[in-house]
Amino acid sequence: MLVKKTFIINGMTCSSCSATVEKATKKIEGVENSIVNLTTNKLTIQYDDEKVTKEDIVNRIKKAGYAPKEIVIEKKVTIPIEGMTCSSCAQAVERSIGKLDGVSRVSVNFLTEKALVKYDTERVRLSEIKQSIIKAGYIPMNIEKNIIANKQKNPENKKTKIMWLKFKVAVGFSIPLLYIAMAHMLGLPIPITINPESEPLNFAFIQIILLIPIIIAGYKFYTVGFRTLLNGHPNMDSLIAVGTSSAIIYSLYATFMIINGTTSYVMELYFETAGVIIALIMLGKSLEQRSKSKTSEAIKKLIALQPKEATVLHGDEEIVIPIEEVEKGDIVLIKPGENIPVDGTVIEGYSYVDESMLTGESLPVEKTIDSKVAGASINKNGLLKVHTDKTGNDTVLSKIITLVENAQDTKAPIAKLADIISSYFVPIVIATALLAGSTWLIITRDFNFSLKIFISVLVIACPCALGLATPTALMVGTGKGADNGILIKSGEALETAHKIDVIIFDKTGTITEGKPIVTDILAFNGYTKNEVLKFAASAEKASEHPLGEAIIHRNEEECLEYLTIKQFENIPGYGIKANLAEKANIIIGNEKMMLKENIALCDQQAHEKIATQGKTPIHVAINNNYAGFIAIADVVKPTSKKAIESLHKMGIKVAMISGDHQSTAEAIAKDMGIDIVLAEVLPKDKADEVKKLQNQGHIVAMVGDGINDAPALAQAHVGIAIGSGTDIAMDSADIVLMKNDLNDVSTTIELSKATIRNIKQNLFWAFAYNTAGIPLATGLIYALGGPLLNPMFAAAAMSLSSVSVVTNALRLRGFKPST
């Protein structure tokens, strides 16, 4: 089969090198085509993998004197799967997909019923992955193309309704079945036609008739249970199927004996045991399904805000069309009170928009021409015309849903223990049930007693409680994060966050606002503050320096006029000179500029005070006389100091990383209460500073917003990006804060601690339940003089264990941040 691969070739310096590589690879038998691009240092090669291997090609390139490295094109896909009922199912699918060559990562979550797969597109195809799921005994569904449209159909709600209907059928028939089976033992009235003493055969047949609808309602226990058992991957359904089938088969044998005249077998019918077990398990499953649907309520709230229609302008005509038909470039009209249907740019109108559902920010945001708006936010009080920039899966809302769902589909490291146990759990339980049943049969010679033990062990064992412990808490935790404007991309990030002991904040744009503003103006030698500002702003009009922009902005705020510039000179590293129409010669710049022009500064103490506050003084001289200075600073965000105080209360050290001079950085750090100052750090060295702290044994989080923060965000144990930052920073981060508020950093850590605490509680109760329940079911406690567990009570206990774990996870919905 022809295979196409791409390699990066290190060591090539000229066209002769590329020709050498091309020549060397083309000589290999089986190579169809070989092209080297010297500009990109890439080799694209096509070969027959039956005649030559990748290793042969690599060795030939190395022999020619160059270092090849294969470029692996990996794709990440989420596949919905039908038929999984417990964590053992998820383990079976995970093992089956993981065996495929080219799959680098697979995570299956039976709670969301999805597999998250990362694979090399050149080594394995999506169809092969789907085939491996089928081989494991489950059904891969079509991959969602339009996230929001698919979610709006709400398949979970339909599934819950069907499950409750099946439960009602099961319980409707199991109640009379239980009454008929037990009435004669409890002295309750029973029709003579089905009395076991006078009509034993009718007594057996009526139970079979009542049991049939129950089995039909719970048919999936048998289809899935026996299929997975035969595939060598038994799950919880297998335990129920084997347990209830044993009771049914023995009862059918007893019925056959009654037909043949041995009426004593009327006391050995266990149809009601099978029926009630199925009904109780279905009750547990129905409650579990209802609870599971509540774990993703945060996402459902977001989806509900997405309008199904949009008003699009075609010339002067307003046309209402389905949201799926809106195209990039369309002009959308949004009236007051309507939900914004697309991501776009305001081209006409003025309004305030409620973005709280996306960012967690409670106050509406002002929107004017050129303002960006996001789909699902609410237009409050003005008419807006919006140019559509993004639709469908490219919108902010879709990305938030994808991020949250991907996080829910990943696994936290703490889940690994439960996964390992779940993978061995069901086979061990089946072996334990056989051993316990056989042992009691040998001891008592009582088949009925042994059968009860066998069924009880199978039914009480609950891999579901173990499997649900982690994903339910993660789903609620990540959903609660989304409610608060915190997007957590993976379960691993959520778990690691509670261990953080050092947080590094990038200064510019993270601790500070990210744009310089004028903070102080001091005037000397008879000049006024407004004169100093006006002359400086007039000269800076011709400059493109960011500090100059701050001076111009302040001048406009003060509504001062601009003077006409006649001449302008920029002196790099020093400042500027300008000649104004009013015959004024202006010199603006740093202290070096003033010394260069022999202009004496006034009030040295004021300059030093400004410097210690982390501000930059811009000196102004008019006609060679010192007129004053303008202090400029990138001011600290109002929430930064409180956020740092919150982190200190948690025992977390705070570091600040900046390219500023040491004295400027230390001035800000002192005012903010920052513990570690990393100053004069070049953008390319930020990741190294993170690594240094990691090498000291710290669990480090990095908080940033710019492109130059991306490597440091990726290096940190947990990378946290501010939502107002760049897409690259957000892509590199593990957690994204949609609000521009550093208090959300401490909220993230609080949420992580609450989620991990909840997971530990769930795991404890799941382990405790199985540890206590299985010995009780085996008759071990009975042998020591204790009670014997009836299979029906075992089924009830098993159902309650799963429901209790999910209910405990739902307590996380009450999480409230302290800040």
Image: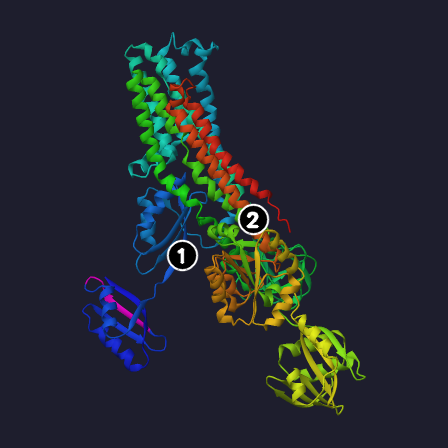
**Range shown magenta:** 42-50
Left or right of 761, for residue 606: right
Kindly indicate the quadrant of the structure image that contains residue 666: bottom right
Dot 2 falls on a residue whose secondary structure is: helix
Labels 2, 1: front one: 2
Amino acid bearing label 1: Lys
- Vertical comparison of 112 with 201: above or below: below
Q: Nearer the viewer, residue 795 or 642?
A: 642
Left or right of 306, for residue 126: left
- Vertical comparison of 600 with 353: above or below: below
Q: CA distance from mark 2 to mark 1?
A: 27 Å
Q: Mark 1 or mark 2, which is nearer the start of the sequence?
A: 1
Name the residue rendered at 73%, 84% in the picture.
Answer: 535
Dot 1 falls on a residue whose secondary structure is: strand
Give the labeled residue for mark 1: 76
Name the residue rendered at 28%, 19% in the picture.
Answer: 442
Residue 312 seen in the current view: yes
